[in-house]
Image (cartoon, rainbow, N blue to C red):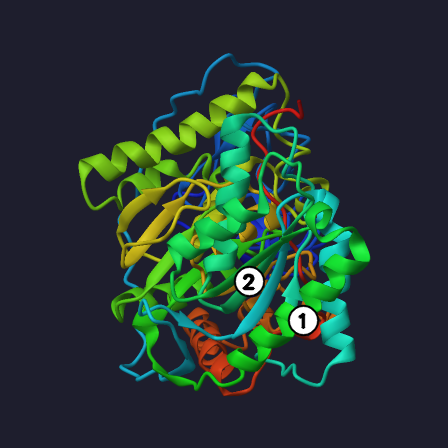
């Protein structure tokens, strides 16, 4: 198969291989060369009429487009996130097509192994987290963690000291400081963490003792300590005290025995970063297949990246479990879009990014319609704000930006104990706390970035495997995380961490 026509009402198709002018593909004679992953018109599209893919608008034709022509940003105008032309969110009528039958996985028992916490939550890892309350403590935090990691034989791959750095904690307005504190505390409370050392300077807005107290409030069973550099008498003394605290925590953590779990213990975070046009055709649907199985077995799934739902909210709203959730979905996505519009710029170039565009994505709508596949087909049962704890079984929408690391940090703060991250362009991103499984949408990226990617969904594009088969691979990989398997991000010591900042520095 050389090209894919996703839905019968679409007026464009996606090239699965490089196509040459004059070729006849899907009954269409191509009028120009079409790069792999890019689109061509399957019918004539008059200027100002909608360009349709995934049975939804991905924009309008900015000029007449002939059947067989290349369709991309040179002849599509996105209709959403257009602060350069609009004052408010556009209301666009969309047809929500009936769902196709989804191939269900055979009944299979997925047995997990991990660390059962006193509140019933489940971790695949048993790490000690060293975290700064303020960016002034970043270097001390790094030195404490590295002193134990490289100077002690206590650590194991599943039970070791990890750290993160950030650029926040002071000179923040109250609501921004509160969000930063929530993210720090939520990451400390994550079930993949046994104990936490919070390090502050001493004069900052977000005090180390307050972060430590919030972690204990969220997870009373954890060992939590804090230090401030000013009270300890400088960097050297803080590092010495910190190393001693962390070593004691590690000794205790190593005595924790692993226990059994199942898919109902999952809080599965979903993410797509460095997307291309294949993301919505292979990796994201495969992740969606896995998510459906998790939910069918009583687990929780997080759909985030609100920016990348703009143009697909009509689909998600139809899956809301009730009218209240439907209204929350629509107001969350359209509210985020209004902030984009208020910036007075065309969202294209920021999202989709230059790499997304090179990979064949032409508008935020097209990207969103591919992104939403990673959430599977189950109902949306809750809507949560950034970094808030996930408390519902089923699919929860978390309001986050599209930025990969800010989103990942927010989901981990919400209790995400495993993340599956799909990518079409390739990225090394991973959490220090939560195992982050990478799934490539195409075989070229899988081969080119083999030290960063765990699973190749490009086999779907190549016709070697089905979407369900890749979904099953994802589930099997999650199981193996408790049996001595580690993600490439873990092997590479990725400790990416960033907090969604809401306001200016003051």
Q: Residue tagged by mark 2?
A: 196
Residue 438: quadrant of the picture: bottom right
Compared to 218, does 51 lie above or below?
above
Q: Nearer the viewer, mark 1 or mark 2?
A: 1
Return the x and y of residue 51 as percentages of the image width and height.
50, 34
Which numbered marker is on residue 244? 1
Disc 1 vs disc 2: Cβ atoms closer than 8 Å? no
Residue for point 59% across, 51% down: 277
Answer yes or no: is residue 467 visible: yes
Return the x and y of residue 129 as percentages of the image width and height.
59, 64
Q: CA distance from mark 1 to mark 2?
A: 13 Å
**Does dot 1 land on a helix, a strand or a loop?**
helix
Compared to 313, does 228 lie above or below?
below
Q: Along the horizontal axis of the image, is 93 left or right of 439?
A: left
Dot 2 surroundings within 10 Å: few (below 14), some, or many (20 or more)? many
Compared to 486, does 371 lie above or below?
above
Residue for point 34% across, 27% down: 93
């Amino acid at each position: 198969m050389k090209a894919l026509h996703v839905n019968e009402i679409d007026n464009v198709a996606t090239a699965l291989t490089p196509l040459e002018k004059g070729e006849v593909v899907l009954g269409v004679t191509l009028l120009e060369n079409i790069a792999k992953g890019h689109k061509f018109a399957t019918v004539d599209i008059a200027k100002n009429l909608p360009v349709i893919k995934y049975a939804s608008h991905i924009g309008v034709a900015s000029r007449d487009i002939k059947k067989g022509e290349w369709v991309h940003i040179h002849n599509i105008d996105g209709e959403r996130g257009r602060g350069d032309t609009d004052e408010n969110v556009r209301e666009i009528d969309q047809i929500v097509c009936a769902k196709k039958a989804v191939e269900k996985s055979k009944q299979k028992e997925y047995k997990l192994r991990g660390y059962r916490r006193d509140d019933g939550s489940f971790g695949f890892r048993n790490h000690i987290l060293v975290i700064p309350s303020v960016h002034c403590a970043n270097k001390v935090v790094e030195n404490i963690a590295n002193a134990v990691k490289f100077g002690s034989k206590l650590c194991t791959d599943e039970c070791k000291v990890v750290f993160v750095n950030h650029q926040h904690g002071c000179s923040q307005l109250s609501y921004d400081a509160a969000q930063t504190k929530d993210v720090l505390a939520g990451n400390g409370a994550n079930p993949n963490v046994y104990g936490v050392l919070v390090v502050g300077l001493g004069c900052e807005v977000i005090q180390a003792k307050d972060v430590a107290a919030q972690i204990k409030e969220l997870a009373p069973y954890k060992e939590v300590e804090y230090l401030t550099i000013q009270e300890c008498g400088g960097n050297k003394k803080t590092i010495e005290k910190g190393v001693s605290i962390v070593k004691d925590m590690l000794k205790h953590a190593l005595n924790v025995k692993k226990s059994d779990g199942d898919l109902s213990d999952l809080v599965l975070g979903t993410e797509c970063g460095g997307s291309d046009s294949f993301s919505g055709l292979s990796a994201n649907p495969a992740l969606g297949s896995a998510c459906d199985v998790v939910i069918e077995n009583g687990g929780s799934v997080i759909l985030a990246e609100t920016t990348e739902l703009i143009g697909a909210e009509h689909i998600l709203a139809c899956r809301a479990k009730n009218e209240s959730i439907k209204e929350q979905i629509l107001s969350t996505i359209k509210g985020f879009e209004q902030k984009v519009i208020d910036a007075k710029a065309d969202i294209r170039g920021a999202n989709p990014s230059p790499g997304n565009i090179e990979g064949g994505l032409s508008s935020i709508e097209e990207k969103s319609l591919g992104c939403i596949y990673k959430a599977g087909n189950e109902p949306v049962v809750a809507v949560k704000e950034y970094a808030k704890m996930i408390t519902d079984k089923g699919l929860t929408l978390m309001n986050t930006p599209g930025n990969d690391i800010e989103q990942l940090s927010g989901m981990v703060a919400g209790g995400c104990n495993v993340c599956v991250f799909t990518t079409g362009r390739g990225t090394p991103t991973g959490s220090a706390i939560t195992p982050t499984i990478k799934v490539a949408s195409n075989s070229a990226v899988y081969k080119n970035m083999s030290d960063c990617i765990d699973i190749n969904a490009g086999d779907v594009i190549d016709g070697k495997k089905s979407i369900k088969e890749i979904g099953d691979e994802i589930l099997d990989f999650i199981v193996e995380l408790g049996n001595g398997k580690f993600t490439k991000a873990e092997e590479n010591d990725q400790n990416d961490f960033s907090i969604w900042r809401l306001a200016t520095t003051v």
